[in-house]
Amino acid sequence: MRRIEPGERLAAFGGAVMTAADLAVRDPGLRRLSLQIDEDLYLVSVVESPADWFNHGCDPNAGLQGQLSLVALRTIEPGEEVVYDYAMTDGSPYDEFECACGSQRCRGRVSGDDWRLAELWQRYGNHFSPYLLNRIEGLRRSTTRPRLVFTRGRALKTPSQARPR
């Protein structure tokens, strides 16, 4: 075992691509060996590999790079477990569970909506799956764009500027 430096590639995921409908009719055990890679697309291991056994952690030392690579987010010491936050890849409710990671940052529950947490956007930067980065960008645009409210024929920039007469 050796020290792993930030940015170092730890694993590349591989397997067969399936839709959620395909995955739903297969052996339920496949879900634990699957990784969501796009809207309604999952990568399912055909042959088990070490990449199938990375645990979730709410304070991860690894993160996604691109669609299929896992890299170190910080220095990982010999003997330290490599974990990544499933919020970086999961955007649907197919694999939700109570979290027992034991981290000070533990959210208590892992859900397919965790990618929506702005705190995680700041902490993980671009270490989300590309399809989630697209969703995040859409949310950022929708929350930073001034909303127009029309009242008596006048457009106002924000709802707080609209006053009843």
Image (cartoon, rainbow, N blue to C red):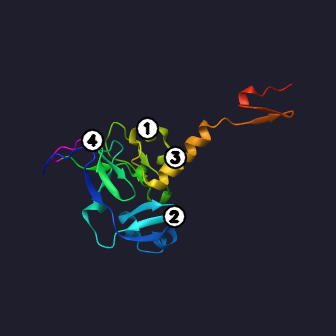
Which residue carries the number 4 mark? 74
Query: Residue 97 at what x, y percent from top left?
Result: 42, 53
Name the front one of labels 4 and 2.
4
Residue type beneath disc 1 = Gln
Q: Residues within 10 Å of mark 3 (few under 14, many from 20)?
A: some
Position of residue 30 in the picture relative to residue 132 (left or right): left
Numbered disc 2: secondary structure: loop
Cβ atoms under marks 4 and 1 closer than 8 Å: no
At horizontal 35% and vertical 70% (from top left) the residue drawn is 15
Position of residue 81 in the picture relative to residue 123 (left or right): left
Q: Residues within 10 Å of mark 2 (few under 14, many from 20)?
A: few
* The magenta segment: 75-79
Position of residue 83 in the picture relative to residue 128 (left or right): left
Numbered disc 4: secondary structure: loop
Query: Residue 120 at what x, y percent from top left?
Result: 43, 41
Q: Earlier in the sequence, mark 4 or mark 1?
A: 4
Q: Residues within 10 Å of mark 1 (few under 14, many from 20)?
A: few
Which residue carries the number 1 mark? 122
Which residue carries the number 2 mark? 40
Which residue carries the number 3 mark? 136
Position of residue 35 in the picture relative to residue 47 (left or right): right
Q: Earlier in the sequence, mark 3 or mark 1?
A: 1
Name above or below for residue 105 compared with residue 47: above
At horizontal 43% and vertical 47% (from top left) the residue drawn is 109
Inspect the magenta stretch and tell me whether residue 95 lies in it.
no
Query: Residue 49 at what x, y percent from top left?
Result: 26, 66
